Image (spheres, grey):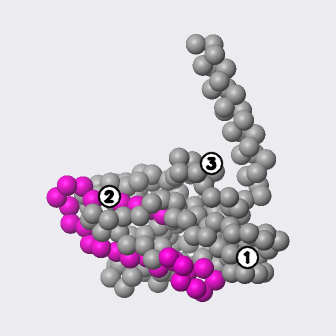
Amino acid sequence: MKLRTLLLTAIFLSTLGALSSDDSKIPKQEFGLEEGLLPEDISTFPELKTWAIYQSYELEPDSPHLGLADSICRMVPESGLRFLLEKPSNTKSTVYLYLDLTKYRPLKGSKFKPRKLQILVNGKPKRSLLTEKNHGFQNPVEIPLEPSEYPDGKIYVELVPSQNSVGRFWGIWDAFVVENRLEEKE
């Protein structure tokens, strides 16, 4: 029992030290409460979970990657959403943009309309996500970026829902850029 406690403490402290030393250097966007937004621009996990239940969906929670799980989501309007991440352009290798998006799973007997989300980085299409009754995507969404794709260090991310996406189905919990790919179980 003492050995197990010691091991858990060591793992916790090593993880805490790694997060606190590297966390401030990671370009990230947490979508909290911003001035000038409409009430429908921001949702919390309990609010979205309630909506999902009425639609016969199950909502996947905000991923805890890099300690960013705050359960606050920036909804993507029908017209799309654009935001900026800045990464020093002195990196000479591929970096990885991660987007933690709202993801719903239809429950048995529910009607689930297919929806598509186009992801653009600095104006160029990078990824297209499709969510259907029997097909989804893996969160967080990974997008590799070469240094030539953000020469000035600015990474403009644009999320554009398909024309049939009426309302605010899509949302983003967090976005971040790292130099090393995330592990599968991270």
Q: Residue at x 36, y 60 (%)?
A: 104
Residue 58 marker? none
Rounded to the nearest whole Å, what is the CA distance between mark 2 and mark 3? Answer: 24 Å
Indicate the secondary structure of the residue bearing disc 3. helix
Whole-percent x and y of residue 76?
A: 48, 73
Q: Quadrant of the N terminus?
A: top right
Instruction: Identify the amino acid type marked 1.
Output: Pro
Whole-percent x and y of residue 34?
A: 62, 67
Whole-percent x and y of residue 107?
A: 24, 55
Rounded to the nearest whole Å, what is the CA distance between mark 2 and mark 1? Answer: 35 Å
Q: Are marks 2 and 1 in contact (CB under 8 Å)?
A: no
Q: Which residue is drawn at 61% across and 70% down?
A: 144
Indicate the secondary structure of the residue bearing disc 1. helix
Region rendered in magenta:
101-127
Disc 2 crowd rating (10 Å Cα; few below 14, some 14-19, many 20+) is some
Q: Which residue is drawn at 62% across and 19% down?
A: 5
Instruction: Identify the amino acid type marked 3.
Output: Gly
Furthest residue in direction top, as rendered: 1
Q: Which of marks 1 and 3 is in front?
A: 1
Is 153 located above or below residue 18 in the figure? below
Instruction: Identify the amino acid type marked 2.
Output: Arg
Earlier-in-chain disc, 1 versus 3: 3
Q: Mark 3 — residue?
A: 67
User: In this image, 21 relative to 109: left or right?
Assistant: right
Earlier-in-chain disc, 2 versus 3: 3
Q: Mark 1 — residue?
A: 147
Q: Is residue 14 shown to the viewer in this render?
A: yes
Furthest residue in direction right, as rendered: 90
